[in-house]
Image (cartoon, grey):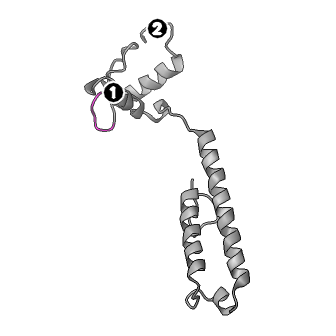
Amino acid sequence: MSPRLPPRCSTTLFRTVSRILERSRVSTLNPYLLGNAKILNQQSVEDYRPGYPRFAALIGAHPPFHISRRFSQLRSRLLLLKQDELSVLEANLEAIDQEEAKELYLGNSRRDKNPVRKKILDDIDSALRQYGMRPDKSTPVR
């Protein structure tokens, strides 16, 4: 027989926590406290000091408990800024390529003597890494 839930306690959350505790070999669950929930290092949540340490232990005890903001708007804004930076670098690289007198340098990077082009390519490499793309892949890293 399961204990009676408090009025504001979610049944789904209670069931999830119950399953976690069963896997942790804890036989009973106090529906008001999650002090018996075990985390990876086998300390109970109650072993941590109150505040952020205990709250972090609680949400770290099981992936569904992990709740945090994604900052989607801020990430999108930074991605737009990085795209703009990459577009400027791309235009600069194209302009340097158009002005190159020796076409051999455009097809052989070892013989290229243009330090400005090398600097721009380094900046593009750095910006692509910050944007979340590896130079060896054509899709963003997830």
Give, as a single range, the part of the protein colored magenta.
40-44
Callout 1: helix, strand or loop?
Answer: helix
Image location (x, y in percent) of residue 91: 71, 69
x 64%, y 53%: residue: 81
The answer to whether 97 is drawn above or below residue 142 in the figure is: below
- Kind of residue at badge 2: Pro
Callout 2: helix, strand or loop?
Answer: loop
Q: Which residue is mark 1?
A: 54
Disc 2 packing (10 Å; few <14; some 14–19; many ≥20): few
Quadrant that contains the N terminus: top left
Image location (x, y in percent) of residue 53: 32, 30
Q: Is residue 35 visible?
A: yes
Residue 48 quadrant = top left
Q: Is residue 22 visible?
A: no
Between 10 and 107, the residue placed more toward the observer is 107
Q: Earlier in the sequence, mark 1 or mark 2?
A: 2
Between 3 and 119, the residue placed more toward the observer is 119
x 26%, y 26%: residue: 47
Between 102 and 32, the residue placed more toward the observer is 102
Gap between marks 1 and 2 measured at Cα: 22 Å
The answer to whether 138 is drawn above or below residue 28 in the figure is: below
- Kind of residue at badge 1: Arg
Residue 42 covered by magenta stretch: yes
Q: Which residue is mark 2?
A: 6
